[in-house]
Image (tube, coloured by chain):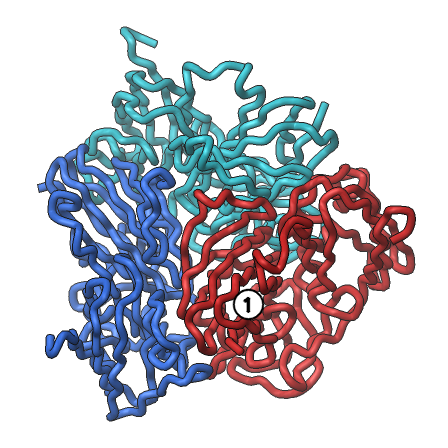
Chain colours: A blue, B cyan, C red
């Protein structure tokens, strides 16, 4: 924070990501991670995000869902916003005019390739009026899928693997860059209000299902849904480009699956045991 | 019903299902059927469902959408709930604490294979306050798809065929285990309130379209939507893991298509004539 | 308009459509276009639509979303409505009983092939009470995808190409029959209310994303959503058979992308530069 401006740095770069113990994929991410770090701001903030390009080709960042000037929107093919050459950086600077909500950032240059290499992350506008009395747990999960090369169907073994970003026959499905059982569990206690923010910038729409609970759908693409209009569900379809916030109250102790319901996607490379886009909600 | 507990029996077993006249697929189902029988209970019921495993491998049943104890939730990979060995049974017993609504049951063991073999069915919590004055017709349709082996594209001929549960190039699409024109029509009379409950546990999201009418979306994943919030539509996307209840009033006599709108899915193995995930609403 | 009946003519015929400069696809359409012309009527209108079949096989038209008599519904496989032989015509005539909203028309004969050849268009019931004070811009966009034969992945070059309607590996994605950068931009001025009507009769559900703005979802399948129930989003999933109307207020000048968010679909045949189901909103 300098002179009322919040500074962030994102380095777009090749990232070797461990998606399962000993299984590494060679993708592209930000600050050493796929997905990149989750950016958190408040309404009214002035932000400056310096994006370094350490990729072997031009890139840009689109601040997906934010109502910002077109010069900062990050789609150089059609907008007056730069493509950042390898070795260079650009300062995206804008004021946060959207209300509190869940958004995303991702490359919008050579998107057919770069998005599928992993270049995305969460962008959350926090609510300054919200306190721990309202929401006791607040999670963000980015959904991604990859075609990892060099493994036969059913095969998962330690190694470092290339991604084929143009191949649509996906074999590994991640939550925050990891496959089950290597995903991070969502820890809760009894009698808490839990929010999970879901985001997707990949190809496939993922229907995310909770066990043992119903959840309320509280925000769509970063826009709060009025309480009287909220739908109660246990499965929410998250398409590419969408974010959905869901909330539930913890009144059923246990260890509960939370996962994409497509059978293929809760497996690592079609193995029989549970894997992929799957995590657990664990009551402590 | 014994001592206030409702007893059910489900036998998980290989099932040879006639999906079209003379065309049989060798899948897995319950009690000789794909999908299994629709279980009907009331809020507050105590139920005991004995599940026999006559499959050649371990299985389990997940009571999808029900807020029950984790010991009964049926996902042995992560929960304290058993995998049932071949030749054994397990008694799932729980109280129905959810309100009236449409849910499902399905295997949650080796799901990438077992769900795609056909192991699922409907689980409906009936409303004790609802009478024939409110709803005159009440249907449940489970949407499923299969990759049937041994037929060239465009070919449909009598025989008994294997399923390949790992192949995502689906060629047969069913409503309650049958393809059109072998699906069961939905019979109605003029001036009736008709409810159709749609459920999906397969891979693909199916947009189900009605002809000649609009419908109101009355429940999402077993949770009633308040009247003032109900959306009017003629096509509803049903993703894997979702149930949607729709209702319409019969004021346009005829024989009306009700089907998945994806062209490929209203065909049997890409044949030109109408088939697949398609049925008719017939006014008597 | 003769004796209070509005007359329209649609000619179903082979159409060579220029989807990119110099790139022509040999599909099927109406009146020389893919999609066909957008039909506009008012509630209460009596319409007569003469459909000539100049295709090499039988066809029909289904008036998707309209509550009309079954004899006019256009699905000859199951309804008492004719298949139109090559060289013949049929007069579809009916009264518009639906309220104002966005619907579609499309073939419903040999649909697995004919719909994927391009045979569809928009059918809009205008609101006689609506004026330029309410909505200053009103656009309709039909989303379609095609498998164009004879081009290697990444290759786009001038020529006249066949479509394979049975191949689900789509390589060209269109808005109103054109791929970006050949799509028609949506022109707006500052401080306008803009409506975009989206329709889809193809295979894939397309999540359409706007940059720089949020939109309100104002109608579902031709049914107006009451103001108090409208969801604010920036990405809307449009499945096959669905129409969605969205509205936004132009308060962020620039040239703004409006596109399917699936990376593969904003490319022409997997080329790196932006293409496909993509257009721009241009402030004048």
| Residue reaching furthest to the top | B3
- Looking at the rendered image, the quarter that the N terminus of chain A falls into is bottom left
* Mark 1, secondary structure of its residue: loop
Question: Is residue C243 visible from the viewing direction of this image?
Answer: yes
Q: Write down the chain letter for disc 1.
A: C
Q: Is residue A163 above or below residue C114?
A: below
Q: Residue A110, how many percent across, how many down? A: 41, 81
Q: Is residue A181 left or right of residue C42?
A: left
Q: Quadrant of residue B43?
A: top left
Q: Quadrant of residue B153?
A: bottom right
Q: Is residue A177 above or below residue A113?
A: above
Residue matched to label 1: C169
Question: Is residue A150 visible from the viewing direction of this image?
Answer: no
Q: Is residue C40 left or right of residue C261?
A: right
Q: Residue B63, how many percent across, how many down? A: 32, 32
| Residue reaching furthest to the front | C133
Q: Residue at x 49, y 71 (%)?
A: C190
Q: Residues within 10 Å of mark 1 (few under 14, many from 20)?
A: few
Q: Is residue B271 above or below residue B40?
A: below
């Amino acid at each position: 924070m300098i002179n009322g401006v919040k500074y962030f740095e994102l380095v777009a770069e090749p990232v070797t990501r461990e998606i399962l113990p000993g299984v590494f994929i060679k993708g592209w991410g930000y600050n050493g991670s796929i997905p990149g770090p989750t950016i958190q701001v408040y309404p009214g903030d002035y932000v400056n995000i310096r994006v370094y390009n350490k990729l072997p080709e031009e890139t840009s960042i689109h601040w997906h869902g934010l109502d910002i000037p077109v010069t900062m929107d990050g789609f150089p093919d059609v907008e007056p916003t730069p493509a950042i050459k390898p070795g260079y950086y650009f300062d995206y600077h804008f004021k946060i005019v959207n209300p509190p909500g869940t958004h995303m950032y991702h490359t919008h240059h050579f998107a057919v390739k770069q998005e599928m290499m992993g270049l995305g992350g969460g962008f959350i506008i926090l609510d300054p009026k919200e306190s721990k009395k309202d929401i006791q747990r607040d999670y963000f999960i980015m959904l991604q899928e990859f075609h990892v090369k060099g493994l036969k169907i059913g095969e998962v073994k330690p190694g470092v693997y290339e991604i084929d970003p143009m191949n649509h026959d996906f074999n590994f499905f991640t939550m925050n860059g990891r496959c089950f059982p290597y995903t991070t569990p969502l820890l809760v206690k009894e009698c808490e209000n839990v929010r999970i923010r879901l985001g997707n910038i990949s190809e496939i729409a993922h229907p995310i299902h909770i066990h043992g609970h119903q959840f309320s759908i509280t925000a769509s693409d970063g826009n709060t849904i009025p309480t009287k209009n909220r739908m109660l569900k246990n499965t929410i379809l998250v398409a590419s480009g969408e974010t959905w916030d869901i909330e539930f109250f913890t009144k059923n102790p246990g260890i509960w699956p939370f996962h994409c319901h497509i059978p293929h996607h809760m497996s690592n490379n079609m193995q029989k045991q549970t894997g992929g886009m799957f995590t657990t909600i664990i009551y402590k």
